[in-house]
Amino acid sequence: MHCAAGKDRTGLVTALLLSVANVPVATIAPDDAMSAEYLTPLYTPMLETARKLGYAHMFDSPPETVLDTFKYLENQYGGVTGYLQVIGMTAEQIHQLHGMLVD
């Protein structure tokens, strides 16, 4: 998987996959937040302009974003598995995916 900076779409898909692998969200959220630190060299040339135009926050990756996302998925779909089923995955496919990630 790929996106321009590797944190938004890629980060979300990675968080969902980690959840399917039974990694606790308390581990996923701070791990995702580290992306801001590691991607800083990529963003540095754009930060001054981003600050002036008011969108520097887009380069942040606070752990609350993942925590809030998982809370939303829990409230709306009963969790990640429920969400994956709503978007078209079968229980068997989720089980197979879990096996591929864990075994």
Image (cartoon, rainbow, N blue to C red):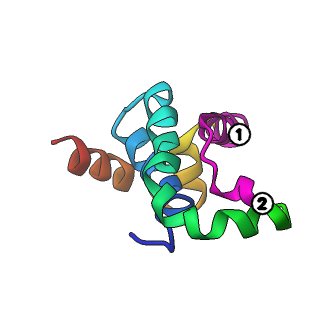
The answer to whether residue 2 is magenta is no
* Residue at figure coordinates x 50%, y 30% from the top left: 25
Q: Characterize the local packing of mark 1: few (<14), some (14-19) or many (20 or more) Cα atoms within 10 angstroms.
A: some
| Cα distance in 3D space between marks 2 and 1 | 29 Å
> Where residue 72 is drawn, which disc sits there?
1
* Residue at figure coordinates x 33%, y 39% from the top left: 21
Q: Is residue 21 above or below residue 44?
A: above
* Residue at figure coordinates x 49%, y 25% from the top left: 26
Q: Tell me the quarter of the picture where residue 53 sits.
A: bottom right
In the picture of the structure, the residue carrying the numbered disc 2 is 51
Eye-nearest disc, 2 or 1: 2
Residue type at mark 1: give it. Tyr
Q: In this view, does 20 lie above or below 52?
A: above
37 relative position to 62: left or right: left
Seen from this angle, which residue lies furthest right? 53
99 relative position to 54: left or right: left
Q: Is residue 1 above or below residue 21?
A: below
Residue 62: % across, % down = 62, 39
Residue 96: % across, % down = 28, 51
Q: Tell me the quarter of the picture where residue 1 sits.
A: bottom left
Q: Which of 36 and 49 is in front in this view?
A: 49
Is residue 13 at least partly visible in the picture? no
41 relative position to 52: left or right: left
